[in-house]
Image (tube, helix red, strand yellow):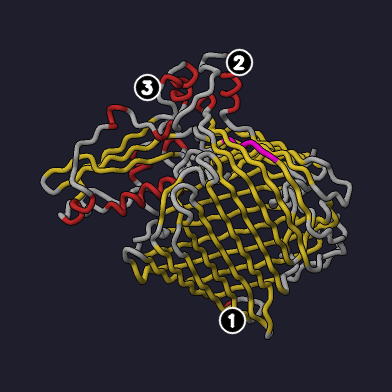
């Protein structure tokens, strides 16, 4: 039974107590809206106010900003008024109002703007795993001043985690402690240890998205691995809003590790990689209006990789060539301000912010020996995303397309060129089900020796072992029928399910002679648990998959338990 990955959610022990203790809360299924849709009665009533258009036309200014933070469990709800959930609330460190205030895009004295209120709520949903379903609205108006109310719902963020996996006949395990809202400040901290088929690792991570209540951010990470060390630091003032005029940032890091290579899911050799990277960038919004935000970013990038034979390993495939790229770059980005909110699309019972507008960028840099590089090269990187809604209100459909091209033009040819395309399609087959289809394609040309495409159970072909096929071209198609329920057992998880079909293959010349098995296919079914109360991921996947082609001696069934950011 290969391909299993399990991380213990912090609420699973609580769920076990619920199962053992019977009515503490009741065993009966709970139906209805998720808790984050519920506003306490004392906050629910809002007097009749002028419309957003009237407030903006009257140049109303923002007055008082009230912030209300609702605990993980609400004792006003009958299903949550018990000693176990009250204990969880007592142990949970509530988010500090300043941590919420730092993420708002408006301040007292600013002109009222419904767009900034909506974008503030979107920023919280997208960037703050420790908060759910923010409500931001005007609640009072007097003499040209409008007061604003901000309501957020906390989730559990202190996560002692245990990991276990089995893949390719090898076990992996680990443990960690993380907090996505350290002491209620919105800072992320994590320490842990893991051991898998590649390495043993002890690590620590830190991230602060709002340094001292500002929009400055910083990050730091360190890993002590059995095959080397990894470290990285960074600080930036990002484009935190579509109306942010400037950004600036600096980061640096080093990753020394042993890279293991596989064919048909089996290890065959390894090499040592010492990768050093650094970036400095400055950005300016050259156009900001109601429809578009256009940005120009310039900077300097260092990307230096050195490859060597790994101790105690015999090389079978060629060693990648060293690569030292140091170059100034410019990048132009065009973003259309076209967002819609949905639910039960890629998540379960959560408001999702979907970008339906065009998002495109073109970037180019020039590496040369006088900049510290080991070659002359034009470095290209461009990306295009867009989305569409159609099909009407009864059975809506959504289509999202993404394309990316990255390459180097050097020595009169195109090297390390990668063209990647994604298509994602949703069709609401009923009020509780959606059909989902996805197509991924990767096309490589003159790829560097450390760049190739793997396909297996860890990359979407769920019925097969990890890293099962590889090459310089790849295609993967997935079709799912997804079920979204309003079952909310123990008021901890929103439950869904899926049946799926995957098929894919790789093409091109692999690094070592490997049988190309053609189109591989699998079928399966799975359970989805939306994590309503914790910042621990978004959706827990429990899948069983069956390969339809078994050209080699692989298991007839793959069992997978993973935590992912989408359905």
Q: Earlier in the sequence, mark 1 or mark 3?
A: 3
Compared across the picture, whether 143 is left or right of 164 comes to left
Q: Nearer the viewer, residue 110 or 334?
A: 334
Q: Main secondary structure of the magenta part?
A: strand
Q: Is residue 443 above or below residue 463?
A: below
Disc 1 crowd rating (10 Å Cα; few below 14, some 14-19, many 20+) is few
Classify the position of the N terminus by image quarter: top right
The residue at the point 76 percent across, 51 percent down is 521
Q: Are marks 2 and 1 in contact (CB under 8 Å)?
A: no
**Pair 1/3: label in front:** 3
Q: Which residues are magenta?
A: 525-529
Circle 1: element type: helix
Q: Is residue 528 magenta?
A: yes
Circle 2 residue:
20
Q: Secondary structure at mark 3?
A: loop
Question: What residue would you read off at disc 3?
Answer: 76
- Above or below for 553 versus 153: below
> How many tags in the picture?
3
In three-dimensional space, the C-alpha distance between marks 2 and 3, rounded to whole angstroms, equals 24 Å
Q: Which residue is mark 1?
A: 370
């Amino acid at each position: 039974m290969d391909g299993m990955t399990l991380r213990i959610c912090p609420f699973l022990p609580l769920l076990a107590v619920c199962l053992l203790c019977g009515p503490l809360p009741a065993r009966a299924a709970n139906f209805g809206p998720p808790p984050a849709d519920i506003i306490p009665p004392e906050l629910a009533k809002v007097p009749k106010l002028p419309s957003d258009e009237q407030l903006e036309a009257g140049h109303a200014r923002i007055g008082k900003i009230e912030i209300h933070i609702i605990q993980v469990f609400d004792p006003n709800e009958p299903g949550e008024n018990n000693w176990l959930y009250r204990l969880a609330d007592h142990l949970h460190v509530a988010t500090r109002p300043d941590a919420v205030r730092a993420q708002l895009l408006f301040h007292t004295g600013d002109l009222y703007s419904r767009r900034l209120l909506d974008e503030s709520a979107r920023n919280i949903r997208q960037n703050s795993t420790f908060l759910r379903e923010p409500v931001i609205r005007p609640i009072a108006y007097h003499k040209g001043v409008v007061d604003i109310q901000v309501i957020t719902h906390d989730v559990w963020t202190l996560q002692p985690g245990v990991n276990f996996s089995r893949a390719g006949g090898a076990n992996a395990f680990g443990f960690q402690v993380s907090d996505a809202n350290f002491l209620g400040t919105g800072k992320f901290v994590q320490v842990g240890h893991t051991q898998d088929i590649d390495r043993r690792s002890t690590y620590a991570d830190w991230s602060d998205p709002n340094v001292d209540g500002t929009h400055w951010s910083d990050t730091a990470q360190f890993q002590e691995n059995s095959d080397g060390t990894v470290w990285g630091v960074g600080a930036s003032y990002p484009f935190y809003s579509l109306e942010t005029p400037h950004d600036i940032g600096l980061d640096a890091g080093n990753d020394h590790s042993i890279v293991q290579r596989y064919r048909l899911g089996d290890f065959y050799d390894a090499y040592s990689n010492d990768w050093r990277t650094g970036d400095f960038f400055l950005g300016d919004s050259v156009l900001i209006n109601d429809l578009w935000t256009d940005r120009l970013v310039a900077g300097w990038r260092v990307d230096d990789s050195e490859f060597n034979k790994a101790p105690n390993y015999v090389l079978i495939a060629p060693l990648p060539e060293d690569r030292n790229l140091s170059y100034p770059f410019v990048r132009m980005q065009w973003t259309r301000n076209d967002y819609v909110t949905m639910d039960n699309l890629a998540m379960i019972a959560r408001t999702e912010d979907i970008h339906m507008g065009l998002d495109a960028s073109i970037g180019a840099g020039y590496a040369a020996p006088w900049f510290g590089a080991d070659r002359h090269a034009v470095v290209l990187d461009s990306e295009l995303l867009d989305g569409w809604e159609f099909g009407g209100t009864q059975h809506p459909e959504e289509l999202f397309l993404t394309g990316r091209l990255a390459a180097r033009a050097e020595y009169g040819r195109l090297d390390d060129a990668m063209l990647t395309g994604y298509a994602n399609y949703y069709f609401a087959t009923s009020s509780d089900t959606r059909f989902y289809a996805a197509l991924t394609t990767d096309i490589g040309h003159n790829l560097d020796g450390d760049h190739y495409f793997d396909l297996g159970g860890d990359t979407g072909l769920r019925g097969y072992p990890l890293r099962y096929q590889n090459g310089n071209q790849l295609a993967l198609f997935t079709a799912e029928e997804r079920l979204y329920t309003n079952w909310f057992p123990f008021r901890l998880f929103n439950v869904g399910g899926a049946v799926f079909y995957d098929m894919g293959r790789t093409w091109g010349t692999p690094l070592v002679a490997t049988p190309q098995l053609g189109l591989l296919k699998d079928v399966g079914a799975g359970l989805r648990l939306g994590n309503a109360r914790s910042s621990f991921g978004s959706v827990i996947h429990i899948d069983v998959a069956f390969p339809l082609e078994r050209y080699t001696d692989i298991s007839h069934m793959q069992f997978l338990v993973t935590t992912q950011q989408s359905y």
